[in-house]
Image (spheres, grey):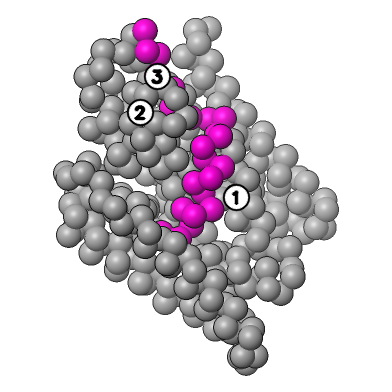
Amino acid sequence: MTGTMKRVYLIPLGLWLLFETVAITLWLTKDNIFYLFNFSYIGTCLSLGLLMYGKHKKYARNVVQFAVGSYMLLYLGLISGENMQIEGFWYYLFLGVFDAAVIHYLVAKIFGPLLFARGWCGYACWTAMILDLLPWKIPIGPRRNLGFLRYIVFAISLLFIAGLFWFHVNHIASVVFWSFIIGNILYYFIGIVLAWKMKDNRAFCKYFCPVAVFLKPASYFSLLRVKNNTEHCISCGACRRACPMDVDVADPSRKRINGTECILCLRCVEQCPVKSLHL
């Protein structure tokens, strides 16, 4: 079996085993079978998506986005009443409860990126699953210096939840649930407007999404990342032109431009004419 073929099977298998380990551990420690189902389902979807991608199945990533994103948005969010946005994370932290959104953020967005970078953004985000359907898949202009906006939104979300507790607002759980619904509507609206104005599907992710504040630091050290075999690379620039997040993929170092923005969509790998890029 060649190195490429090994990666096709071993990376999805490793990811699946990781999620199964989390699923079983949480099931046993929390005595709640929901965690077994939840993380097994997400891990299986992500692993099958990577396997399908490795076998060159068209729309593999989009299928995974909708399988995981719709589950998080519709089942966990609207049906089960869990705010899986950042406000839900702050809410449970202020309650002092290690549950729901706190566990989700720790696994997927705080410590998880040490292993799979910002794979959440590329394969599971329910906001991006819609934005990726828009027609501006490759940014037309240069990246703008608007990243500070995500930190403002991050602070607003924290202050919003802190204010609910500080002022002893009645029915906080209900307020947090409705903030999930209203927040998602605003995110979709802002994301679509930004994509249309900037001709860039991922403008929301680059400049506005507060979750990136958690994702970026650990992503720098990610085990799973796109690597470049510089001996084969011809420096044609095709990979960078294809990247929706403006990552300088040809640079093999961790300090490459926008390196912590990589969502592992692997479009750069697809476009490389000499196949020098790989996970």
At a point 72% along the width and 40% down the height, the residue shown is: 21
Label at residue 171? none
- Dot 2 alpha-carbon crowd within 10 angstroms: few under 14, some 14 to 19, many 20 or more: many
> Which of the pair 67/216 is nearer the observer?
216
Range covered by the magenta-colored residues: 209-231
- Report helix, strand or loop for mark 1: helix
Residue 61: % across, % down:
39, 39
**In screen coordinates, is 102 left or right of 124?**
right
Q: Is residue 80 visible?
A: no
Residue at which label 1 appears: 110
Residue picked out by circle 2: 249
Q: CA distance from mark 1 to mark 3?
A: 26 Å
- Work out whether 246 lies above or below 53: below
Q: Residue at x 60, y 50 (%)?
A: 110
Res 18 quadrant in image: top right
Question: Callout 2, which amino acid?
Answer: Val
Q: Position of residue 17 (x, y in %)?
A: 67, 33
Mark 3 and mark 2 in contact? Answer it, CB < 8 Å.
yes
Task: Tell me if 235 is positioned left or right of 177 in this view.
Answer: left
What element does badge 3 sit on?
A: strand
Please state if 32 lies on the left or on the right of 133 as rendered. right
Question: Is there a contact, CB below 8 Å, between mark 1 and mark 2?
Answer: no
- In the image shown, does 206 or 175 lie closer to the viewer? 206
Amino acid type, residue under disc 3 in the picture: Asn
Looking at the image, is 27 positioned above or below residue 57?
A: below
x then y, percent, for residue 223: 57, 30
Identify the residue at horizontal 60%, vertical 55% (top origin): 105
Residue 12 on the magenta span:
no
Q: Earlier in the sequence, mark 1 or mark 2?
A: 1
Residue, disc 3: 228
Q: Earlier in the sequence, mark 1 or mark 3?
A: 1
